[in-house]
């Protein structure tokens, strides 16, 4: 080949490889529309200085706008910031058609050095949902001036506007990395992180490296190949960490085509996570306002049940009834302050900090609360007293840091499950509001309901009673001992749970809590003695004889676990009961001697 011709071809090839245009964007494609009908809006995206810096001196030659509905009386604007009073560039657009619309700038816009660039468009939409937005959320791509209302607002997505950059000083070997998305296995310390990289340079990428570090120490390197200009590629990696404390994971583009990336500020992304000790596990208490009169409240019941199934060790539901027979009558142990704070039902909160709908918002509230650090751990034991009329609570709490002047309160909520016999209003009956977890097959009202986690009392009051104001030394246990008389509204002692809650006395928020189920004095225990005990029934009574010359206790329950009567005795006892089926438990001070089902005629 003629060497001169070869050099000309090589020069042409190199020129071609360096002439690609870079597309700057946030959201990839429109997933949905946003906006009211008959409205005028001006959506903006903002490329901050650190984003736009590699392209300073080059030109934005065209802009693409995605809309879901036809728009008229349109203008394109370029500013330094969306809320600037004056624009740098404006161009009349006439109309925008559904889909992507490419606008060639009448005058290419030279990207300034050291300044941000905001691009937006003003449009009149006759139909609702006109603005094209992506579900992928970026704060810099979610600014809208609502002209019709003279106010700024957001779309909760990313506005689909892209900018095409061209010029003689375009960056090469330039890539950016996205934020990290994290998912974790709740049963282990294994976390999976994912994200993407994008080629935003003026040349093709043949190879690149992403270095992953945990707390500054490299854990692995990810390699990739063949990224055309404007193309992106996903990546993912796993972190396994069981060391208690706060940790930082980073992913950084460290090599592009065998050299360092040309612009470092957009090469690294990070995320933090916390490994809790078992004692410092953060548990979320969800207080839900509900009532049998509330036709929408079945969705709250479903929301709590689904969360209980998904997070059995971290989610603690409390169904607070108001205005129905399950409302707590005793004001001293009621949830009246919570009920009065609610504007309607169903409604709920997580740890008294995040509020919303107990079905639609429950995951968001739970996740927000989960991200907060916790320094107070709590454990508890709960036992019946000898005659099963009261509960003996010992709550142990501690901090993982020294606290000089804590202000901690404690409250004990008693809940009961398995409650039946009440009619529930049901707006989902007959499918008139769609299928909803079987409620569409029930009547309105319906008696086919089992109410669970119903609040029966909050001992100490809604704001709790003082438990600690003196200084606390890290990892030193402190205890709160309390005796709770069994509330009269309890139907079945075997179905109750107690929730000790440590409350911030200043903010009123629940710091941490634990849920425990007291043992029903033998109902849940195992027989551990070979003593001879005989049970029978005669003349409307249960009879007991035993060859043990020591104090014994007889406890008579319904099959549902409700205590009917009890007696202390030696050798023999007769306990009168109405006709029916009973579970009889005979025990001494330490062991269950016999447990049997007795039919009394």
Image (cartoon, rainbow, N blue to C red):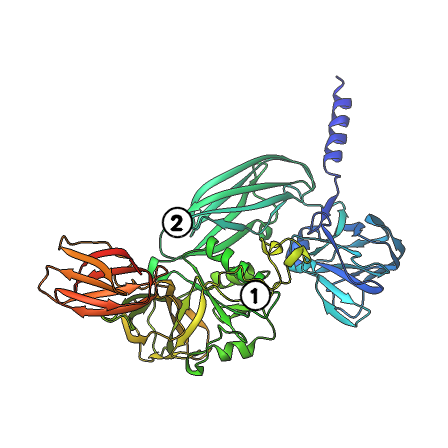
In the image, residue 529 sits, relative to residue 300, either above or below, namely above
Q: Earlier in the sequence, mark 1 or mark 2?
A: 2
Percent from the top left, x then y, of residue 26?
Answer: 68, 52
Percent from the top left, x then y, of residue 70?
Answer: 86, 54
Rounded to the nearest angstrom, the CA distance separating label 1 from label 2 is 47 Å
Drawn side of residue 275 relative to residue 60, left or right: left
Occupied quadrant, residue 406: bottom left
- Mark 1 sits on what residue? 424
Occupied quadrant, residue 257: top right
Q: Nearer the viewer, residue 450 or 337?
A: 450
Q: Nearer the viewer, residue 333 or 129?
A: 333
- Mark 2 sits on what residue? 241
- The residue under the point 65% across, 54% down is 51
Drawn side of residue 534 relative to residue 470, left or right: left
In the image, residue 501 sits, relative to residue 46, either above or below, namely below
Foreground: disc 1 or disc 2: 1
Percent from the top left, x then y, of residue 339?
Answer: 53, 76
The circle drawn on residue 298 is none
In the image, residue 141 sits, relative to residue 402, either above or below, namely above
State which quarter of the image contains the C terminus: bottom left
State which quarter of the image contains the N terminus: top right
Drawn side of residue 450 relative to residue 279, left or right: right
The residue lying furthest to the front in this view is: 539
The residue lying furthest to the top in this view is: 1
- The residue under the point 62% across, 66% down is 295
Percent from the top left, x then y, of residue 488?
Answer: 38, 75
- The residue under the point 55% across, 66% down is 423
Is residue 47 visible to the viewer in this orientation of the structure? no
Within 10 Å of disc 2 (Cα), the crowding (few <14, some 14-19, many 20+) is some
Is residue 14 visible to the viewer in this orientation of the structure? yes
């Amino acid at each position: 080949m003629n060497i001169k011709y070869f050099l000309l071809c090589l020069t042409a090839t190199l020129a071609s490889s360096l002439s690609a245009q870079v597309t700057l964007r946030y959201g990839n494609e429109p997933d949905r529309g946003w906006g009211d009908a008959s409205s005028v809006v001006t959506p903006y995206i903002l490329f901050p200085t650190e984003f736009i810096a590699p392209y300073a001196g080059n030109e934005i030659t065209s802009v693409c706008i995605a809309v879901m509905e036809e728009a008229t009386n349109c203008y394109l604007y370029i500013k330094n910031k969306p809320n600037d009073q004056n624009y740098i560039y404006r161009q009349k657009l006439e109309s925008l058609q559904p889909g992507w619309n490419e606008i060639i700038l009448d005058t290419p816009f030279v990207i300034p050095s050291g300044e941000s660039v905001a691009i937006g468009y003003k449009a009149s939409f006759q139909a609702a949902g006109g603005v094209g937005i992506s579900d992928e959320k970026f704060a810099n791509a979610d600014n809208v001036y609502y002209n019709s209302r003279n106010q700024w607002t957001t779309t909760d997505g990313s506005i689909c506007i892209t900018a095409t950059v061209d010029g003689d000083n375009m960056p090469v070997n330039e890539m950016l990395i996205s934020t990290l998305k994290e998912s974790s296995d709740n049963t282990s310390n294994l976390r999976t992180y994912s994200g993407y990289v994008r080629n935003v340079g003026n040349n093709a990428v043949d190879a690149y490296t992403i270095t992953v570090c945990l707390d500054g120490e490299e854990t692995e390197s990810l390699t990739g190949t063949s990224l055309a200009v404007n193309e992106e590629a996903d990546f993912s990696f796993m972190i396994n960490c069981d060391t208690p404390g706060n940790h930082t994971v980073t992913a950084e583009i460290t090599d592009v085509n065998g050299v360092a990336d040309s612009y470092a500020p957009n090469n690294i992304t990070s995320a933090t996570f916390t490994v809790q000790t078992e004692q410092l596990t953060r548990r979320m208490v969800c207080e839900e306002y509900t009532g049998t009169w509330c036709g929408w409240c079945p969705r709250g019941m479903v929301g709590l049940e689904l969360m209980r199934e998904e997070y059995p060790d971290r989610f603690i539901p409390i169904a607070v009834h108001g205005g129905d027979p399950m409302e707590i009558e005793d004001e001293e142990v009621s949830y009246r302050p919570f009920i009065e704070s609610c504007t309607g039902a169903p409604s709920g909160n997580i740890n008294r900090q995040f509020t919303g709908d107990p079905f639609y918002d429950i995951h968001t509230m739970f996740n927000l609360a989960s991200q907060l650090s916790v320094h107070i751990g709590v454990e508890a034991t709960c036992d019946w007293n000898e005659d099963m009329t009261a509960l003996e609570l010992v709550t142990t709490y501690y901090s993982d840091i020294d606290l000089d002047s804590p202000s901690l309160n404690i409250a004990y909520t008693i809940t009961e499950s398995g409650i039946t016999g009440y009619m529930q209003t049901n707006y989902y009956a007959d499918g008139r509001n769609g299928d909803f977890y079987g409620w569409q097959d029930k009547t309105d009202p319906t008696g086919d309901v089992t109410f669970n986690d119903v609040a029966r009392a909050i001992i100490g009051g809604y704001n709790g009673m003082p438990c600690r104001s003196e200084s606390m030394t890290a990892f030193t246990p402190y205890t709160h001992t309390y005796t709770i008389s069994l509330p009269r509204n309890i139907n079945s002692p075997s179905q109750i749970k107690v929730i000790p809650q440590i409350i911030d006395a200043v903010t009123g928020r629940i710091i941490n809590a634990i849920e425990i189920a007291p043992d029903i004095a033998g109902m849940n225990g195992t027989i551990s003695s070979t003593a001879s005990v005989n049970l029978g029934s005669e003349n409307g009574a249960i009879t007991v004889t035993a060859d043990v010359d020591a104090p014994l206790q007889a406890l008579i329950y319904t099959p549902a676990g409700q205590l009917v009567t009890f007696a202390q005795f030696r050798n023999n006892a007769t306990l009168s009961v109405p006709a029916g089926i009973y579970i009889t438990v005979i025990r001494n001070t330490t062991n269950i001697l016999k447990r049997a089902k007795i039919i009394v005629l």
